[in-house]
Amino acid sequence: MTATTPAAAVLSDIIRARRSVRDFLPDPIPPDLLDAVLADAKWSPSWSNTQPYRIAIASGDLAQRLKGELCERFDLAMKAQQGGLWGKLKLLATRKGLPDGDFATNFAYPADLQPRRRATGHGLYELLGIARHDNAARNRQMRRNFEFFGAPTVIFVFAHQGLREFSILDAGIFLQTLMLSAQAHGLATCAQGALATWAGPVRESFAIPGHYRLICGLSIGFASGKPINSFNPGRSEVPELLIPTR
């Protein structure tokens, strides 16, 4: 049997300890700490070392402004949804609150993936004490995405459209490297596809090259001690991931 090296043991601990944190302390991240995390993330592998991703980082007043603008759009979208046909027509007419992301973030999940999605959602809301039919509480929790769950910093991740799905694959590898480095440095993270719903406020705040598409956001900071941060939906066992031979 091959002995586990100290480095392998540390890496395994970091991988297993990482969680999607949904409640952050407001404390700002020291610049040198964030720089150290990004210095690790830049070593992520990519297609022919093209590094077909870019990031936009918002902290302080900019993060607060973006939070306000994204929450305003979320509130308008929820109001339209609750207003029935008339509300939806009004949303279409004004277009304020209408999703303008580069990718759709609201779509039907494939049937074979629904069980895990539902189990995760059920476990999360049960921990929060949110009943299944309490739509108001569910909307409030969804709104927390656009408040960055209280994190002092948010990172928006963009992928180059020229490499199609492969740039998104590379951006995902970059994101995982960043999250693991953050965990090793005592920071917490939450990758959020919801933050790609409205790209307008982000594009207005940063000089994003035209051929880059917003795929997600990442809230980053120091985790609070709230119970929600203990949520662990678990993972499939390795045999479930294996495709059998014919």
Image: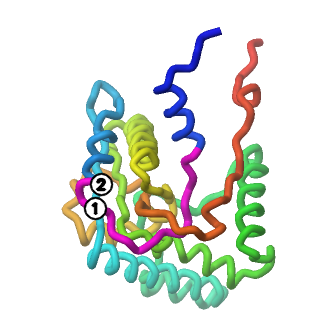
Q: Is residue 187 magenta?
A: no
The quadrant the C terminus occupies is top right
CB within 8 Å, label 1 to label 2? yes
Kind of residue sitting beneath label 2: Leu
Please give the label number shown on residue 149: none
Q: Residue furthest left?
A: 207
Secondary structure at badge 1 equals loop
* Image point (45%, 65%), residue name: 195
Label 2: how many Cα within 10 Å (few below 14, some 14–19, many 20+): some
Q: Position of residue 191 (x, y in %)?
A: 49, 55
Q: Is residue 164 visible?
A: no
> Marks 1/2: CA distance?
7 Å
Q: Is residue 26 magenta?
A: yes
Q: Is residue 152 left or right of residue 231?
A: left
Q: Is residue 67 left or right of residue 118?
A: left
Secondary structure at badge 2 equals helix
Please give the label number shown on residue 34: 2
Q: Which residues are magenta?
A: 17-32
* Count of numbered badges drawn on the protein: 2
Chief SS of the magenta region: loop
Q: Quadrant of residue 25?
A: bottom left
Please give the label number shown on residue 30: 1
* Image point (37%, 38%), residue name: 167
Q: Position of residue 137 (x, y in %)?
A: 68, 82
* Image point (56%, 66%), residue name: 22
* Image point (52%, 85%), residue name: 75
> Compared with residue 75, is residue 106 higher up or lower down, i.e. above or below?
above
Label 1: how many Cα within 10 Å (few below 14, some 14–19, many 20+): few
Kind of residue sitting beneath label 1: Pro
